[in-house]
Amino acid sequence: MAKRNPSLRFQPTGGERRAQVPVGKKQTLAIERLANDGRGIAFVDGRTWFVAGALPGEQVEARVLAARAQIVEARSERLIVSSAERRPAGCPHYGQCGGCSLQHAPAADQLALKQRALAEQLQRLANLQPLAWAEPLAGPEWGYRRRARLAVRWDVKKRTLEVGFRAAASQAIVGIEQCPVLVQPLQKLLPPLQATLRAFDKPQAIGHVELFSGTALALLVRHVGPLAAADLARLEQLCAEQQVQLWLHGDGEPAPRDPAARLGYRLERWDLTLNYRPGDFIQVNEPVNEAMIAQALDWLAPQPSERVLDLFCGLGNFALPLARLAAEVVGVEGVEAMVARARENAAQNSLERVHFHHADLSKALDQAPWARGGFPAVLLDPPRDGALEVVRQLDQLGPERVLYVSCNPATLARDAAELSRQGFRLTRAGVLDMFPQTAHVEAMALFEK
């Protein structure tokens, strides 16, 4: 046996190992194009740089945030050559707060980026493109969020309470004085809320706070220990002055201080009110949510004689409007509390042709009593993980049309490939701009046999 040369012991295959780019290093970069997440892409010495806050055609000085192999993540810190497309950010906290990442890009460019991201995922993962692209569904650029969570942390050394949003790529908290993407009533609530929280005798008891705007304004305080009596009185005074419901969340479920308090949102086009509780999932963008529902009903085109299945139905956001049109709607949801809320919403709106069921949607569906008889039309609105196990079983239910609403183009594309294998054709697709100023992509796709 040949004797090994100890000098070659740690030599990597392919030659000498290159030194890693150190975190904190500054680098001048020429940005060539945008990644699907909105970061600029540059190339230096065989490495690909992803640069937050940069646009194509710009030359920037960027600081390294992380590096691995041939990929470097960085943040633009100084503009050397600016793009003509760049616009001023609409928020003084932009660049520090992690909530928005695209305020420097025009609205039309943001939509084009999201449309391209969806098209690329469908092509790459499913080898599909729709027969027709829909125009993006968009609403106001600003003042659209009707729900927000504020981080709260007591700084022991400084003996101050930090209140704000998480910083980009960090657990640090950026103190905010304003947030232009919140609906106006919640923007007005920020200053008095922060003043009240910072006056607490025992601020260490607060975990986080959440704000809601719908049929009422609501403030949820998550506390990790008992609230001092004086602090609770401060909260109650704030909510009385601002005409806001107060909800507390300690052990167990969130509960309103006033047991009669009701929190909900309206779907005006269908004359519906949907009640919910803090912790339930709702769409944060009211105008785009209504436009999304209207487009879903138009594309799915439920007939008065048809049964429609709504999977991952939640509170009934789609199922209740569908019940205005179809012979019967069956809503299925994996969270039991949401099923109970959906049933209450159906009863409150006097809808008798909609029925809600609790089920584990990763299990076999064809044996479920609610699945008997099949459905010519199916709507899915799954979480980010998608619905592959459900999609694999859809053919057993006999649908002619499947409408898929997605918050993750990658899992939509993966599931679209499975639907294609079952003989479905992707006839329409488009993006829903539920989160302007961010790279988050929501999408809708219609599949027909």
Image (cartoon, rainbow, N blue to C red):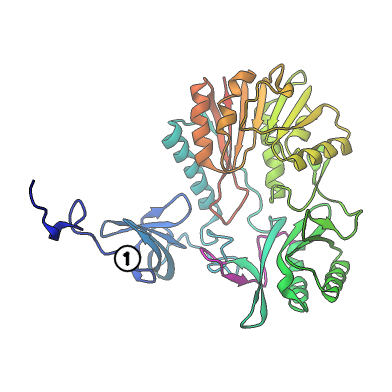
Q: Position of residue 32 (x, y in %)?
A: 36, 56
Camera sees residue 273: yes
| Magenta-span inclusion, residue 291 | no
Label the magenta part by its dominant secondary structure: loop
Of the 4 image quadrants, the one containing the C terminus is: top right
Residue farthest to the top, as pictured: 373
Is residue 135 shown left or right of residue 319? left
Residue 353 location, x and y as percent?
82, 26
Which residue is more in the foreground, 132 or 366?
A: 366
**Residue found at the very far bottom of the displayed protein:** 158
Identified at 65% across, 60% down, the residue is 181
Q: Is residue 189 above or below residue 123?
A: below
Q: What residue is shown with label 1?
A: 21
Q: Which residues are magenta?
A: 167-184
> Residue 340: where, in percent of width, then height?
80, 39
Task: Say if 37 sits above or below 445 in the image.
Answer: below
Q: Is residue 326 visible?
A: no
- Helix, strand, or loop for circle 1? loop
The residue positioned 7% from the left and 48% from the top of the image is 2
Residue type marked 1: Val
From the viewer's perspective, is 41 left or right of 232?
Answer: left
Taking the image as shown, residue 134 lies to the left or right of residue 289, namely: left
| Residue lying at the far left of the rendered structure | 2
Q: Position of residue 4 (x, y in %)?
A: 11, 53
Residue drawn at 52 percent across, 31 percent down = 416
Image quadrant assignment for residue 239: bottom right
Q: Nearer the viewer, residue 91 or 306?
A: 306
What residue appears at the point 63 percent right and 48 percent down from the top-left corner? 434
Q: Residue furthest front?
A: 1
Q: Quadrant of residue 294?
A: top right
For residue 10, which quarter of the picture? Answer: bottom left
